[in-house]
Amino acid sequence: MSTVDATGGVAAKSSPAAEGHPVATPGQRERSFRIWRGTAEKGEFVEYTTEVSEGMVVLDAVHQIQAEQAGDLAVRWNCKAGKCGSCSAEINGKPRLMCMTRLSEVPDDQPATIAPMRAFPLVRDLVTDVSWNYEVNRRIPAFQPRKPDFEDGTWRMHQFEVDRPQEMRKCIECFLCQDVCHVLRSHGKYDGFIGPAFLVRAAAYELHPLDTADRATYLKDEGGIGYCNITKCCTEVCPEDITITDNAIIPLKERVVDRYYDPIGKLVQLIKRK
Amino acid sequence: MASSSPPLEVLPSTRLGATQRIDHWWLAPFAVAVGLALCGGYATWAIFQGQNYFAEPYLSPFYSPCLSAECPAEVRLLGITWWPFSPAILIMGAILGFRGTCYYYRKAYYRAYFMDPPACAVEEHRGSRYRGETAFPWILQNLHRYFLYLSIPILAFLWYDTLLAFRFDGGFGIGVGSVVLLTNVVLLSGYLFGCHSLRHLVGGRTDCYSCSRFPEARHGAWRISSIFNRHHMFWAWTSLVFVCLTDLYVRLVAMGVLSDPRLI
Amino acid sequence: MTDLDSIEQYAYDVLVIGAGGAGLRAAVEASACGARVGLVCKSLLGKAHTVMAEGGIAASLANVDERDGWRVHFADTMRGGQYLNSWRMAELHAKEAPERVRELEAWGALFDRTRDGRILQRNFGGHRYPRLAHVGDRTGLEMIRVLQDHGVHQGIDVHMECTVLELVKDGDRVAGAVAYERERGLFRVFSAGAIILATGGIGRAFKITSNSWEYTGDGHGLGYRAGAELIDMEFVQFHPTGMVWPPSVRGLLVTEGVRGEGGVLLNKEGRRFMFDDVPALYRDQTADSPEEGWRYTQGDREARRPPELLTRDHVARCIVREVREGRGSPHGGVFLDIAWINEHLSNSEEHIRRKLPSMYHQFMRLAEIDITKVPMEIGPTTHYAMGGIRVDPDSQMSGVPGLFAAGECAAGLHGANRLGGNSLSDLLVFGKRAGEYAARFANENGGTTIDGSEVRRSIDAALEPFSRDGDGTGAYQLQFELQEKMQNLAGIVRREEELEEALASIANLSERAQSVAVPGNREYNPGWHTALDLPNLLTAAEAVVRAGQARKESRGAHFRDDYPDKDPESGKFNLVVRRGSDGEMVLEERPIVPMPEALQQIIEEQQQ
């Protein structure tokens, strides 16, 4: 329990400095990185060595290399806090955000490989052309609310109803799930498949309590949801921990089943409506 | 200082298994492949074997409900005996269909057996045209909910069998086998309750719960199913392994290899 | 010489520069008004700094406490800004914010809910009642995503990863902009009937900042060079709670929501030092005891707010004081403790994870600290520029015809200090107004013509760094030096000599910026981009320092060690910075327009 002392301040029971906080100044040491340099036509991994200190993330090392050794090293970044989803890359082959990957979790017995995302055309170095994703987003049938519940134009929704779509709204559009999805990465279905990121977006609309638009046909035909064979790599790489496969894609697949692959269910629905 | 190294791997390499991952990514698909093969192998043998599946009062879960003329009188269901083959084959059709189209097992075997993909960010065979689940045969995965419908009564029979497993000579009792059967049916229930299709059908298809009839019931059912769904993989594996072990236990008791100690 | 025919050219009715909350809202509005809209942003769409906003949108919806209303919100905003605000903007903002929030909901935003299904509102520093509509601690992300999707479905043209170099004028009126796109380094020329600047702030002028690389004062520099006035530049908000350890994340924001949920500030002796110094203006509204403060955070309407929820400028200064006097934490901050609430809540760990998910995640991932168990180490971080382009309160047009500004790069609403949560509502309210009035201006005044020689001049200037000799680290080096100087000499606590020194450094850096060289070619070359951002950043920094020198008092976010008190005379004017006829920076005191009686009365009523 806290108590107010004579001068009006408050003393807690113990000094917080005692617990949990390392006091020593972080030590410096050298580490090596193999960073992809070049364009789609011509490029190679170049090895850089730089001083790193405790608590650094991969993006810090890349920035340091950029400032000290390679001024024109192209890398995309913004918030450096895992909230904007700009600094996506493949670190030792795993799609990750550079700003959220601490050097301490990358093995130091060999140079860490930093490569651009593979599923998208390379612009230069670590930067890829992700414009395809924005095209896809434009074509998803937009949110369409039902008529307002009240004359002042407002609705009532309960927290338990919005919990589910709110998970989908955590998406920061880092496109790591698009990058890792083998339907795009290996099979190149850019024309027939919108990828996990936009299935998440579609789910955000679909699960929205106010939404009235029907996306089953879109998802089956243009969205290509059938291409997904639910191998869950998207869920594994999501930095926002969205349960993409179980909470977005499969519920959407089930909705497509409702519409196209469940004759008995449809019959029941028809009878119920009568 | 920067030093140029020869291009160790030019982007993008498309050979099967090509990756920049340095961890043991092949371990998980390998383990799944072995695990599924072992369980599948044992189950197939047990089904066609057609003997030693009943040891009073325990019926192997592979053989319930027992609808064959071969079935011992004690476990015949309403005296129906029209099935001419091993009693297990009929039931296993439904169960195999249910597990085979299960959203979790699909992931497991697409990765382990079809290497499509073998692991995340690992290259796969690009040769044939990829159709995913949009075309035959995999489009049939959409029938998952029908297998769910078939599995629900089977699970009910298993619960019935489990109740019977606590009856010894007309009175209540508990043997090791009773506990084994109970554990088995609990695991199977956990697996079924978390089924993605069930989760959808009981409430997941609703967007606006407060606009629907029975909002609490609907959302509650969805929530409970979601709790099991979160660990669907856990339930899938434990129930699979344990159903084999349960069959093995009953079999060994029936063969007289094990005696079934009575606890109460 | 650059061949203009080879340059991509675009014509719009309204060109919006910047795609954060204000830019997107403006673009959506202008497009809804029937204008052809082009939206230019430095990053990819949806990555703007607005996504970092955690706390919420301040709007007096009165869903949680029915005593709230626009009058209270207005009075809170004016008090927070120490009455240097544009009262008209504060009035419009308080009146229109609720409608802007409801509009977001109609476009698909999913706010957290009250028990009866309405938009939930939370407590925040300086706001009398729970007022912030929020989505966990990722409100800004929700807002950006909703506006982004609404905008693209409306058919706005977006130019991603495209930076504006210079505005082009047609006589007095703004006529277009010259820009380059990052991917290939090619130039683009935009002609437009009206231009809206929505470029955000100047945080990159400081070393410890919560802002991303984009925040280089582009709008400030572009507007200033085009002849617009900058106002209130001395007021830079230092958010009291930024991370201090590990070094690589120093400055990263820790949301005020932590304190809103009951988090307390402690020095190394474990003392809750915020109780030691409560300013007179807020004494009546502040809790007497920790117990009362706790009750306030838990929604007790009779309780008063804990001192941790005083305005940001004050909290930041108290933290600096503790650190300077040797009572700081091991890494030069103080402790922010939310774990202590286990004294009141048995399920505190789960509660914290649910209420502050991204904070929990951020500390777990980046500092390996579990905030449900141990206190965080925090310290002030550069967060927000109250100062910016002076605009007409109703239309958001600057002194340059056709040039509008909205959001952080505009000024007026926040005065000497911004209240948390007032930023997101600012973006919505004035973004909308800017879009509406810009569309109207473009419609009424027709098209513009662009002078090719002006375009050619800016392009040639932009390409110059490639033709200079040097190893190319120059641009980064200059930026680091500027950040170091501004942090140390023009930060939270300022002194005449230090500001003088800062000014000299800026002059020196501006000189050296003329000869920056960059290596490589034009394709996605961050070295080049940094070099091109420098002039804007230097302009903004100079304006901050000059205005800081001229305001010889301490008020709001501006604290002078040599003039530690508020001076009533200095409260009668705003400081305006503009470009003189010879290109030099001119500073001027601009008397504040007296407030109408009705508004004055509201302020007096609310003081009770």
Image (cartoon, coloured by chain):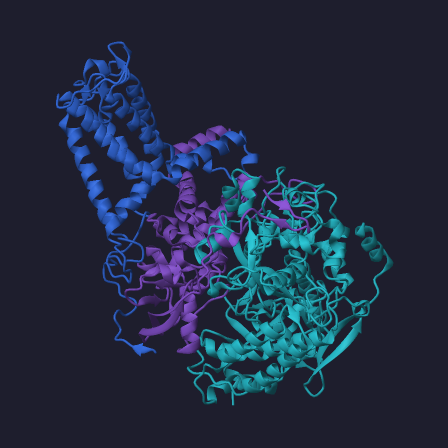
Residue C79 in the image: x percent, y percent? 75, 58
Q: Nearer the viewer, residue A127 or B214?
A: A127
Residue A20 in the image: x percent, y percent? 46, 53
Q: Chain B is drawn in which colour?
A: blue
Q: Which chain can be seen in purple?
A: A
C170 vs C261: above or below: below
Q: Quadrant of residue B22?
A: bottom left
Residue C8 is at least partly visible in this image: no
C457 vs C143: above or below: below
Residue C579 in the image: x percent, y percent? 70, 81
Q: Is residue C478 left or right of residue C95?
A: left
Q: Which of B102 and C380 is in front in this view?
A: C380
**Numbered circles on residues, count:** 0
Q: Is residue A250 left or right of residue C383?
A: left
The residue at the point 82 percent across, 53 percent down is C602
Residue B48 in the image: x percent, y percent? 15, 29
Q: Which chain can be seen in cyan?
A: C
Residue C543 is at least partly visible in this image: yes
C338 vs C513: above or below: above
Q: Which of C479 and A151 is in front in this view?
A: C479
Seen as rendered, the residue at the extreme right is C597
The residue at the point 75 percent across, 44 percent down is C67
C587 vs B160: above or below: below
Q: In which quarter of the image is residue C444?
A: bottom right
Seen as rendered, the residue at the extreme front is A6
